Image (spheres, rainbow, N blue to C red):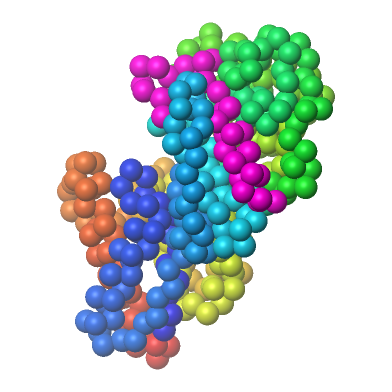
Amino acid sequence: MRILCAPDSFKESLSASQACLAMQAGIRNAAAALNAEIEVDLCPVADGGEGTVETLCRATGGTIQQAQVTGPLGETVTAQWGLLPDEKTAVIGAAQACGLHLIPPDKRNPEMTTTYGLGELIRRALDQGCTKIIAGLGGSGTTDGGAGMAAALGAVFQGAPEKVRGGDLADIQKIDLSQLDERLRQTTIRVACDVNNPLCGPEGAAAVYSPQKGATPEQVKRLDAGLKHLAELMHADADTPGFGSAGGLGFGMAAFLGASLEPGAEMILDVLDFSRRCLDADLVLTGEGQLDGQSMQGKAVTTIARLAHEQKKPTVALVGSIGEGAEVCFDRKQGGYLTSGRSIINKPLTLEQAVAEAESLLAQAAEQVVRLWLVAGRITGDE
């Protein structure tokens, strides 16, 4: 029997790699208890959010690089990025250079933050000789439409300071891309994008995401107007799905750098060769912090279930909690392909306790699922 472990991270408790190891421990306990031989394939995954760099580097044997870049408030920060074994492909996470976690809660103001450091990180990858870039946009603390990033790569935004911030967008008079780094023309940039929000409007970057980054209602209006102005200067369609991701970084990556926006989880799973690995598995275990109706919006767990279903493989999700609307994830008529799912919580716990005990709870849940799977196989003769 072969089990493919393909969890996403459990936010604030376990990385995807740690979740894999916890699952493996539980599987081994079940195998030992029931005298079964089980091969385990560890495939930690991501959807373009936090952990993407670590996940892809660990899975492919890539290396973690470091660079000093401009942080979201203009300070210097140490950012990590990944170099895959071909030494031509870089993996870059926007949060490393302009993440919300880099901004103290009392200083969160998306009118004052910039993605300039992300552009510096991309330039570092180009300096290293990379001609392919995989970018994850999750966790950003900015709403500058990627203008700061583009400025770091040579774009000129007349009327705005060099390190363009969200609050500077309305002041831009003209955009000059003639000095943009020429190496970008020979570089393929794939952006893992797991939301379909447009750039502007009630479902846009400012309205939906900037309040989480500290914006007041009045700032939301100004940021939205600035993003609309930016799109008009670039003669771009602000309603394009995905342009509103990460404070408009989806727009900036596509409009300024010619990047392609792709469903995050599916793109990462393609790099990890998930479908081929799934062929050899009898059971797929996946997991994340919470399973709910939003999990159907391109998240890793439901994407894994769909790809596994195409190979006629069952998928069980082990999650921290099961929230509102999760039933759709199991309903094939609505595009849900999970075979089963359960919370790893097996006793009354506070949130703090659950986070602290996540590793052992996940191992125990994996053990119980595999025990049931083995027993069911023996009863039906399918072991």
Report the span colored magenta.
102-131
Image point (53%, 25%), residue name: 142
Quadrant housing the C terminus: bottom left
Image height of 78 relative to 113, above or below: below
Occupied quadrant, residue 362: bottom left
Image height of 17 relative to 279, above or below: above
Image height of 193 relative to 26, above or below: above
Q: Nearer the viewer, residue 220 or 50?
A: 50
Quadrant housing the N terminus: bottom left
Image point (65%, 56%), residue name: 88
Occupied quadrant, residue 360: bottom left
Q: How many marks?
A: 0
Does any portion of residue 49 appear in the rendered image? Answer: no
Is residue 126 highlighted in magenta? Answer: yes
Does any portion of residue 90 appear in the rendered image? Answer: yes
Q: Nearer the viewer, residue 198 or 150?
A: 150
- Residue 290, given in percent of the width and then of the height, sits at 39, 47
Image point (41%, 43%), residue name: 324
Side of 159 relative to 141 (left or right):
right
Side of 274 relative to 258 (left or right):
left
Is residue 219 highlighted in magenta? Answer: no
- Residue 146, given in percent of the width and then of the height, sits at 64, 28
Image point (40%, 31%), residue name: 101
- Residue 319, given in percent of the width and then of the height, sits at 36, 54
- Residue 332, given in percent of the width and then of the height, sits at 56, 60
Occupied quadrant, residue 174: top right
